[in-house]
Amino acid sequence: MKETVSQITNHDQSLEDDRIINAMTVDVEDYFHVGAFEHDISRDDWDDLPCRVEQNTKRTLELFDRYDIKGTFFILGWVCQRYPALIREIHQKGHEVASHSIGHHRVTDLSREEFIDDINRSKKLLEDTIGAAVIGYRAPSFSIGEKNIWALECLKEAGYLYSSSIYPIRHDHYGMPSAPRFAFKPIENSEFLEMPVTTFEFLNKKFPCGGGGYFRLLPYSLSKLVMKRVNEKDSESCIFYFHPWEIDPEQPRQENASLKSKFRHYTNLDVMEKKIEKLLIDFRWGRMDDVYLKGK
């Protein structure tokens, strides 16, 4: 690993607000795409299940419009194929469109050849849909780590400028604790960036504070405290993520799933939208490319 890039860019700051700009990201997938249910819902059934991703993504766009927030939407190719108008709306509203793979296969489940095919197909599909370049990628379930770090080189060769696919924590489904906490250049003699989801450090250990289930489960006051600490003590931008299904407490329930999976997926869905709204008010937000690549 190369050393962390502590200051990727100088953020534009207004005279009225000199707080660091953080990166707001949305992984656009439906409730049945998630890794927690991969053993409970067959891929063969995806086309027959009631889709809610379009309405939930539109709710997300309305929420961002309310606070004049621009973010990065990591789009699943499966969603783009079925709702191209939605993807064009995301782009037309000024948000960044980035790749989240075609079919939400973990990178750890793909061969090198299969991964290359996936990232090229996804990039072309999104670019053909919005008529603009796609430069960012996020692996499903943060499934790039020490055993398949070669995937970052493949992304660079495919024309991506950055990835946000490594979570530098220890987790039963993913994680690379040895990775730097903040954006770094993993490839020698290349400007390609890996931008890990944000963590905070306590007692020499890394803990998650960048969104998802952790944000739903933990008190908002704690999330706000540690993210503010990253901005002020570490002088770094936070990278936050969530999914459109996380603001949808009315989604169909998977009763056959394990208790652990149901706890992770369904806990606090009814309060998530309000918590995100607080986050939009309490911090400054922008797109990944603007926060990290502006001026390059």
Image (cartoon, rainbow, N blue to C red):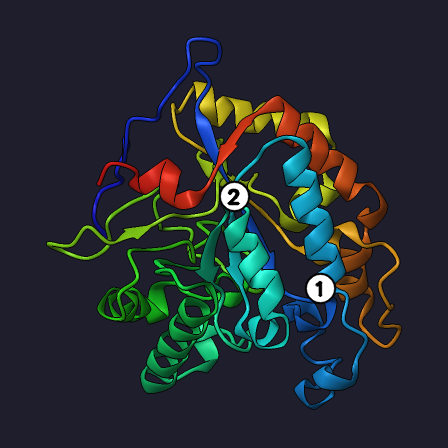
Determine the CA span between mark 1 and mark 2.
Answer: 17 Å
Crowd around label 1: few <14 · some 14–19 · many ≥20 (10 Å):
many
Q: Residue 172 location in percent, x, y? A: 58, 62
Side of 30 where 126 appears, left or right:
left
Between 279 and 207, the residue placed more toward the observer is: 279
Q: Residue at x 88, y 58 (%)?
A: 250
Query: Looking at the image, is 236 positioned above or below residue 130?
Result: above
Q: Residue at x 64, y 39 (%)?
A: 64
- Image quarter of residue 113: bottom left
Query: Looking at the image, is 57 positioned above or below residue 180?
Result: below
Q: Secondary structure at mark 1?
A: helix
Q: What amino acid type should be assigned to the residue bearing mark 1?
A: Val
Q: Residue 80 location in percent, x, y? A: 56, 71
Q: Which residue is mark 2?
A: 71
Q: Residue at x 24, y 49 (%)?
A: 185
Crowd around label 2: few <14 · some 14–19 · many ≥20 (10 Å):
many
Q: Check contact, mark 1 vs mark 2: CB within 8 A.
A: no
Query: Looking at the image, is 161 positioned above or below residue 203?
Result: below
Q: What amino acid type should be assigned to the residue bearing mark 2?
A: Gly
Q: Which residue is mark 1?
A: 53
Looking at the image, is mark 1 or mark 2 earlier in the sequence? 1
